Image: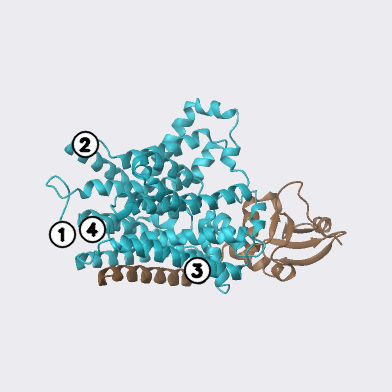
Chain colours: A cyan, B brown
Amino acid sequence: MQRTLLYIMSIGIAAGALSMVFFLLLAAGVPFVGIVPVVGIALWAYWKYGVAATMKWVEDDGSRPFFSLIILAVGMATMVAKSYPLTERYGGWDAWAIWNLQAKYLASDTWRTLFLNVRHGHPDYPLLVPGITAFFARILPMCRIEAIAFVPAFCFMLFIPVLIYLQYAGRSIIVATYVLFMLATDKFFLTLGVSMYADTALAFFFLCALAAMKQQLAGNRQVAIAAAALGCAMWTKNEGVVLSAIFCLFYFRELFLGGRYKYFAAAIALPVLTLVVFKLGFAPANDMAHGLSGDTWHHLTDMERYRQIFTSFSDNIEKNFGYIRMGVLLYGIVCLWRRQWPGKDMLMIVCCVAAYFMIYVVSFMDLQWHLLTSADRLLHQLMPALVFVIADKLAGNGNRMSFVIRRG
Amino acid sequence: MSFKNTAVLVCIGVAVALATAMYVERSRQTTMTDMQKQVIALQGMTKVLPPGAQMSFSCPDNNAELYAICRYTLAPMYLSFVQGEHFDTALTLLRVNAADSTVQVVTTGRRVLWQNTDDTYRYYLTCNP
């Protein structure tokens, strides 16, 4: 694993851990003046005993060609320039109606008021993104809360193409560069990123878990990284729980067997504890789970709903994720050419799409409205992981049949 | 850590700093939105009530978007939009051309803590005497 890659994952996970510790201390009634040093010590311990200890066993990727750094810098500059006209003062609808609203409550001494907002407020949503914003909003009360929220939002968006690029630049600079600029110039990806929605953060953590499983680290530390990333995904959005469950099913052997469950349990303990405290102690019932009723069976047998959802997904891919069609086609061609079945990672993502599909099938809400307001964001959560998997296949393994330009 | 590793992390830091600075600058330039109108119109209310205040909320046509905007503007105050939930304090929005009789319904028998008018709405913050 490249050290830079690990640093990027670690920064994202550290932000998630900060949010979790912050919320747990708030829930325990600790005043903010006591929260700051505890969070500081927790992050210091995480870095010293987690990240730095892991780094000792990771080879330094100082041999990376210099031009690959230039490409990366140009890619990042492109993202900055392209995202600038897409920013809005208060972010997108979900940013001010949910995430930044929750941050405003968490940043105040009367933060429990947040859970009264049952109408259009979604107080059952996990608080990773609002937690990060609220923590810094308390430290920097002179700053607008949206300006504070913009920083982690932009980081999560930026980390996605950078992480994919760093993963594959050594194997195929063409594939890595193409992915970097494809995402850096994709209007929909950038719009959701700078809108300060939590979907991009969830996409990043899901991608992190997948990327971690591609690494081989001493002492099975990749399991701990993947577990921590899945925990952060669960603390970002309710969908994160679904994605994490599917991930664990597909990677059961790599995550749990051979004594690796200990690393998994250690890394996911904090997120699970935070989520349990939040769900049992504070959050009202999830509207989707609460809405399941006798109509659910009727919905399951209503073929029109399946058609409607399929059409919506297809239209969304056509409109917002056009790049993925060519990627999937190339993935299929490479599989045929090499006479391979699609990998486990690809099947997992297909399973995640199927799970989202079924959530719409059983949804008690008006289906048209539900699809209109969320289908694009749900697919956005999975696209970086899908791009990562396709790039993995196209970057090849260095043999003659792969699309590889090897480092000199 | 090698120079190249450090260079990547420095590039990330510069990109984030630059993007944030540009966002802040753009926020200053953008034209007036519904949200900004409400922020300006409701600014005075934050001086009358503490951050943890809870109140009922009503607006023309039970407009959910207007409610969400006001709630965000006034957070961490709590605005109740739930039928049957009553508080001593109430924030009422009326159209700017609302009849005097409508205004009287809102204010009669109640103490007006704060009021304001912009080009779209009249805002009344009232409480039981």
Q: Which residue is mark 2?
A: A340
Which quadrant would the N terminus of chain A be assigned to in this image? Answer: bottom left
Residue A407's label in the rendered image is 1
Asked whether, in this view, residue A185 is left or right of residue B120, the answer is: left
Q: Are marks 4 and 1 in contact (CB under 8 Å)?
A: no
Tell us which disc is closer to us: 2 or 3.
Answer: 3
* First reached walking from the N terminus: tag 3 or tag 4: 3
What residue is at 20 percent from the left and 54 percent from the top? Answer: A171
Kind of residue at disc 2: Gln
Q: CA distance from mark 1 to mark 2?
A: 26 Å
Q: Position of residue A382 (x, y in %)?
A: 39, 46
Kind of residue at disc 1: Arg
Q: CA distance from mark 3 to mark 4?
A: 34 Å
Q: Position of residue A308 (x, y in %)?
A: 46, 33
Q: Position of residue B30 (x, y in %)?
A: 51, 68
Question: Subunit of mark 1?
Answer: A
Q: Which residue is mark 3?
A: A40
